């Protein structure tokens, strides 16, 4: 069995222990053994990043841009191979996995350009004869902690801006999916970054993640994951004055109005609720449907769901891959049981599907006649489970859409400009979609939410500067 090591201060370093990376489409398939960093190794990585920072923070932007561009080009050139690796370790189907890898490559190339465009401002002082310059400087050593559901894109959208703006990085990927992270680190290791600028420490959140969060030499933590873990990380960071950015869960509403194009509404609901096995923070799990279209919509969506093929991520013609793990499958099944007990009506799906291989296959589940107070409509399930909430009109739909602790993405299907415009302004979410799925976003514009979904500055696009740099105001007399 091949072993994959941590990358610390420009060297590949063995772990004291290794964890097996198992394919959720075929539990007999192991992708390799991945090192678990010890707390002492995390400290070494942080020390290496700290030592590299003074030179890297003032390094030439052409060399930085070239290195980031090189990483992006290699990812794009290897997208088929990296896509297969990602599909094998996480379970999203191959076209989605290749799409995610492509996004990661594009992100590196985008930030290769962005690091040449870090503009400041020059203003006249209110005092005559003095001018004021506002510039951005790198933050320092940044700890990056990522979830399992986007094993290469989320690491890319944190690592690329961190390096572009002159920071040093210590990166901890999700323990379930170290393969794509390791492959990305390997590409970065050959791109021309000086030793210590980028470090990979694999292992569990409670050991490796916690050691990073609490280390006084880490100036900032960018985290994507669940609300519970995120809030604890924020408390630890704030306690020692470190900068923190959190992207967390969602319970995204998809409103469907009477005047929607039924075909469009069904397709976007099917996609955003069930594709990627519903394991996207931007997935729509609450389908809020007005009376006039309700019955037609439920029938057509159930029909569409029956055409979705559930199976191994690399299987021919498969639409929905397996759930990522046993624990996640149990959580999905538990919520399906909760929904039934709460009185929602299971229209279709929700059964474990047997395949040729042993894997975590689950038929996408749709509940109808659910109400906003039910747990299935309040808590993030993070699986291929969606519920329909029937409402009398647009005003009620908007109120239900906003009646949630989360606020990441919100969608509306309508042909009315009036309702589309009103929803765009009044949906309490960081991202709004009109006649588009709630999931599926561009890589060059800000990403993030409100309420329980996000904390701190936005990620991605030009807005990424806000977290990865700190502002300096200089007065010149
Ligand atoms: P998670 O359990 O919160 O884990 C996220 C990361 O934090 C993992 O690397 C995890 O390590 C680490 N971690 C766990 N405990 C820690 C601790 N005490 N200190 C430091 N780090 C710790 O989330 P997940 O299950 O991987 O991912 C699913 C969640 O991510 C969902 O809630 C989803 O909505 C959210 N998500 C949000 C976005 C967004 O942008 N808003 C995008 C994707 C996913 P381990 O690997 O060892 O658990
Ligand atoms: Mg987890």
Image: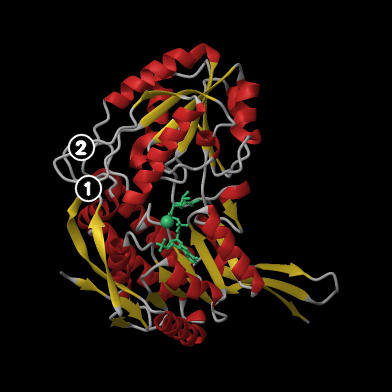
Q: x and y percent of residue 476 in the render?
A: 75, 80
State the CA–CA distance, disc 2 to disc 1. 11 Å
Which quadrant of the figure contains the N terminus? bottom left
Q: Quadrant of ligand 2?
A: bottom left
Instruction: Mark 1: give few (<14), some (14-19) or many (20+) Cα within 10 Å.
Output: many
Q: Residue at x 41, y 30 (%)?
A: 268
Q: Residue at x 85, y 74 (%)?
A: 128
Q: Which residue is mark 2?
A: 354
Q: Secondary structure at mark 1?
A: loop
Q: Is residue 194 visible?
A: yes
Q: x and y percent of residue 463 in the render?
A: 56, 57
Residue closer to the observer: 80 or 323? 323
Q: Which residue is mark 1?
A: 25
Q: Residue at x 62, y 35 (%)?
A: 402
Instruction: Mark 2: give few (<14), some (14-19) or many (20+) Cα within 10 Å.
Output: few
Tell me if 31 is positioned left or right of 409 in this view: left
**Label at residue 270:** none
């Amino acid at each position: 069995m091949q072993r994959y090591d941590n990358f610390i201060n420009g060297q590949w370093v063995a772990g004291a222990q290794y964890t097996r990376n198992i394919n959720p489409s075929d539990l007999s398939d192991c992708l390799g053994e991945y090192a678990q960093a010890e707390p002492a190794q995390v400290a070494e990585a942080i020390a290496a990043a700290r030592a590299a920072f003074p030179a890297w923070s003032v390094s030439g932007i052409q060399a930085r841009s070239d290195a980031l561009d090189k990483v992006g080009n290699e990812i794009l050139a290897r997208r088929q191979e990296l896509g297969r690796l990602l599909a094998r370790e996480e379970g999203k189907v191959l076209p989605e996995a290749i799409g995610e890898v492509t996004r990661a490559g594009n992100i590196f190339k985008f930030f290769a350009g962005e690091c040449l465009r870090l503009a400041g401002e020059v203003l006249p002082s209110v005092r005559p004869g003095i001018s004021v310059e506002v510039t951005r400087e790198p933050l320092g050593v940044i700890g990056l902690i990522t979830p399992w559901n986007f094993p290469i894109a989320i690491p890319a959208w944190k690592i690329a801006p961190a390096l572009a703006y002159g920071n040093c990085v210590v990166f901890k990927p999700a323990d379930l999916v170290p393969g794509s992270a390791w492959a990305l680190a390997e590409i970065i290791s050959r791109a021309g970054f000086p030793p210590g600028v980028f470090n990979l420490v694999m292992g569990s959140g409670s050991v490796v993640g916690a050691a990073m969060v609490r280390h006084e030499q880490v100036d900032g933590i960018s985290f994507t994951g669940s609300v519970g873990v995120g809030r604890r990380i924020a408390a630890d960071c704030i306690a020692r004055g470190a900068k923190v950015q959190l992207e967390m869960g969602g319970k995204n509403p998809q409103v469907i109005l009477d005047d929607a194009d039924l075909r469009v509404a069904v397709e976007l609901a099917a996609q955003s609720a069930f594709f990627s096995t519903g394991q996207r923070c931007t997935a729509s799990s609450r389908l809020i449907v007005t009376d006039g279209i309700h019955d037609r919509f439920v029938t057509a969506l159930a029909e569409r769901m029956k055409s979705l093929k559930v199976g191994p991520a690399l299987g021919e013609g498969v639409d929905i891959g397996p759930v990522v793990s046993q624990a996640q499958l149990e959580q999905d099944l538990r919520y399906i049981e909760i929904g039934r007990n709460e009185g929602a009506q299971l229209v279709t799906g929700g059964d474990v599907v047997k395949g040729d291989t042993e894997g975590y296959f689950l038929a996408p589940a749709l509940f109808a006649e659910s109400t906003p107070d039910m747990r299935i409509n309040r808590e993030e399930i993070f699986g291929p489970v969606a519920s329909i909430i029937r409402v009398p009109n647009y005003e009620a739909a908007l109120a239900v859409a906003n009646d949630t602790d989360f606020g990441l993405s919100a969608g509306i299907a309508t042909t009315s400009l009036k309702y589309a415009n009103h929803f765009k302004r009044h949906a309490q979410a960081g991202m709004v979609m009109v006649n588009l799925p709630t999931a599926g976003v561009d890589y060059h514009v800000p990403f993030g939410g409100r309420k329980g979904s996000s904390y701190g500055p936005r990620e991605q696009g030009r807005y990424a500067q806000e977290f990865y740099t700190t502002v300096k105001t200089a007065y010149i007399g």
